Image (tube, helix red, strand yellow):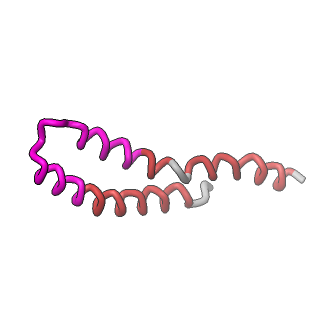
Amino acid sequence: MISSLKDLIAKPIDKKLRFLPFALVGLVAFAINSNPDLHPYLQISIVLFEAKLGIVIVYFLAKKLSKPVR
């Protein structure tokens, strides 16, 4: 009875936290690229680098959030 209650409470929080890594990486990428004074080619290079780095960061953050807490 108690274990099923813990599962019901923990699952909604886990589902909400899955979006967190994507939101954090997106906010950082937007903040870096929001400067209109950057040269377009430099801005494109930064976006491509952020995309590669963002995939790695999201992977590790999602993996860390999905680990069970002891």
Q: Residue 2 appears at what percent x and percent y?
A: 85, 50
Q: Is residue 24 left or right of residue 7?
A: left
What is the count of numbered marks?
0
Seen in the picture, residue 49 relative to 32 is either above or below; the reply is below
Q: Position of residue 24 (x, y in %)?
A: 41, 45
36 or 8, which lies in front?
Answer: 36
Q: Is residue 31 magenta?
A: yes
Question: At x 53% / y 50%, what residue is drawn?
Answer: 19
- Nearer to me, 51 or 41: 41
Between 25 and 70, the residue placed more toward the observer is 25
Residue at 29% in and 59% down: 53
Q: Residue at x 37, y 42 (%)?
A: 27
As drawn, is 34 to the left or to the right of 13? left
User: Going by the image, does 57 lie left or right of 40?
Assistant: right
Q: Within the image, what quadrant is residue 51 found in? A: bottom left
In the image, 61: left or right of 15?
Answer: left
x and y, in percent, of residue 20 in the image: 49, 47
Q: Quadrant of the C terminus?
A: bottom right
Q: Residue furthest right?
A: 1
Residue 40 on the magenta segment: yes
Question: What residue is shown at x 29% (from left), y 38% (from top)?
Answer: 31
Q: Main secondary structure of the magenta part?
A: helix
Which residues lie in the magenta part?
Answer: 24-49
Residues 51 and 69: in front is: 51
Residue 65: image location, x then y, percent: 52, 55
